[in-house]
Amino acid sequence: MKRPRKDGGFPPADMPVRTVHSGWLDLHLVELTGPDGATYERYVEDHGRAAAVLPFNPATRMALLVTMPRAALRFAGLPDLLEAPAGLIDAGETGLECARRELIEETGLEVGCLDPVGAIVATPGTSTERTDLFLAAYGDADRTGPGGGLDSENENISVVEMPLAELWTLMESDLAADAKTRILVQALRIRRPDLFS
């Protein structure tokens, strides 16, 4: 029997798969067949599903973002990025439940309503990760904890509140930006352009 994917499903029955590494993420070597019948191999990083949420304060026109040390960015010689709070969906959890949990853990916010934006696959050439995206309006009364992530996961998260207009300028720049965050900021600007003036 084939090893299940991180999201609980299985790879296609006719796809030869060899697991190279199994842990927090799984790395597989899979065999594909091209239109001409030739076979070739590709690596697949099986990460599982995730959720991300952009919290914004409509009264103050601010957004709440996080930054944390990212090994892959440092490996690539890039600086840490401002990101929308996000995390992997736990077994039995929905994307909405994950977004709420991550919002509390990372920013200390407990909000009433989360507005779905859709889902993205950021790196389809190498990863199975699919991220459910949400927007969340917040006010001062929604701050119920300090945020900062879980000590047990060594997240070392810093919470950054910044004006949406400044965030938009940053997203428009040529600087590298986190894909999920860029998409969420664009979605908010389409839905609520008044918050960016």
Image: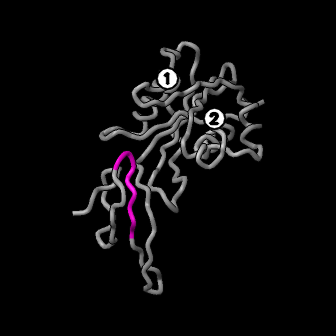
- Label 1 element class: loop
Q: Position of residue 134 (x, y in %)?
A: 52, 37
Disc count in the image?
2
Specify whether 118 is left or right of 88.
right
Q: Quadrant of the N terminus?
A: bottom left
Front-most of residues 191 and 66: 66
Q: What residue appears at the point 75 percent right and 31 percent down from the top-left corner?
A: 165
Residue behind mark 1: 111
> Outermost residue, left direction?
1
Residue occupied by mark 2: 82
Q: Is residue 38 above or below residue 102?
A: below
Amino acid type at circle 1 is: Val
Within-10-Å neighbours for mark 1: few <14, some 14–19, many 20+: some
Q: Is residue 165 rendered to the left or right of residue 79?
A: right
Q: Nearer the viewer, mark 2 or mark 1?
A: 2
Circle nearer the N terminus (2, 1): 2
- Identify the residue at image location x=67%, y=34%: 192
- Residue at the location (33% across, 66% down)? 18
Q: Please state the horizontal and vertical placement of residue 90, each as a whole percent of the image.
A: 35, 39
Helix, strand or loop status at disc 2: loop
Figure quadrant of the C terminus? top right
Query: Label 2 amino acid?
Result: Leu
Magenta region's main secondary structure? strand
Q: Which residues are magenta?
A: 23-30
**Up-down: is 81 above or below 126?**
above
Q: Position of residue 114 (x, y in %)?
A: 50, 31
Q: CA distance from mark 2 to mark 1?
A: 21 Å
**Residue 17 lies within the magenta run:** no
Picture quadrant of residue 13: bottom left
Asked whether, in this view, residue 15 is left or right of residue 118, the answer is: left
